[in-house]
Image (cartoon, rainbow, N blue to C red):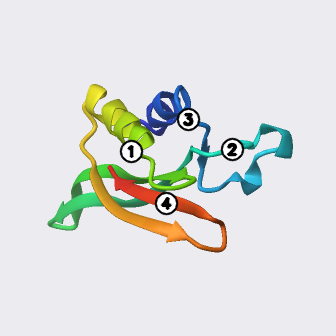
Amino acid sequence: MEPEHLYDILSERFPTCWYDWSEVAEKDRPKSLPYCAILELEPDQTEADDKNYYSMRRYAVELYTKRRDYESETLIESIFDDNDIFYVKRERNFLREEKKMQIVYNI
């Protein structure tokens, strides 16, 4: 999957950034939840005989919500399904200091 495509399909429905919002101008940052952040993970690779035979980019998509938000979770999962993107929902954490939920999808 091309990273631009992932960004485009998510940003149609959620404010979306790469890694975190610190690199985004204040005026362009979301004023409320939910929103997403995309992180590039180590690639999935197959090597043999001192060669890379296969390499696939992998990403974590972090969905941030005010509290447990089944509607936003269903929406992002539908976006993945509609675009034939395999995902694994990895974690659901409440970030106490930031007072928001974080749901992590590995794709």
Above or below, comparing residue 11 to residue 86 in the picture: above
Above or below, comparing residue 106 to residue 70 in the picture: below
Disc nearer the start of the sequence (1/2): 2
The residue under the point 27% across, 48% down is: 87
Task: Name the front one of labels 3 and 1.
Answer: 1
Q: Name the residue under label 2.
A: 32
Task: Judge by depth and name the residue closer to the eye, 89 or 44.
Answer: 89
Identify residue type, mark 1: Tyr
Task: Describe residue 90's horizontal placement relative to residue 24 as left or right.
Answer: left
Coordinates of residue 90 in the picture (x, y in percent): 32, 62
Marks 2/4 in contact by CB < 8 Å: the verdict is no
Between the residue at mark 3 and the residue at mark 4, the CA separation in whole angstroms equals: 14 Å
Q: Residues within 10 Å of mark 1 (few under 14, many from 20)?
A: few
Q: Name the residue under label 3.
A: 14
Disc nearer the start of the sequence (2/3): 3
- Name the residue furthest left: 49
Between the residue at mark 2 and the residue at mark 3, the CA separation in whole angstroms equals: 11 Å
Write down the quadrant of residue 29 in the picture: top right
Marks 1/2 in contact by CB < 8 Å: the verdict is no
Which quarter of the figure is the N terminus placed in?
A: top left
The numbered mark at residue 70 is 1
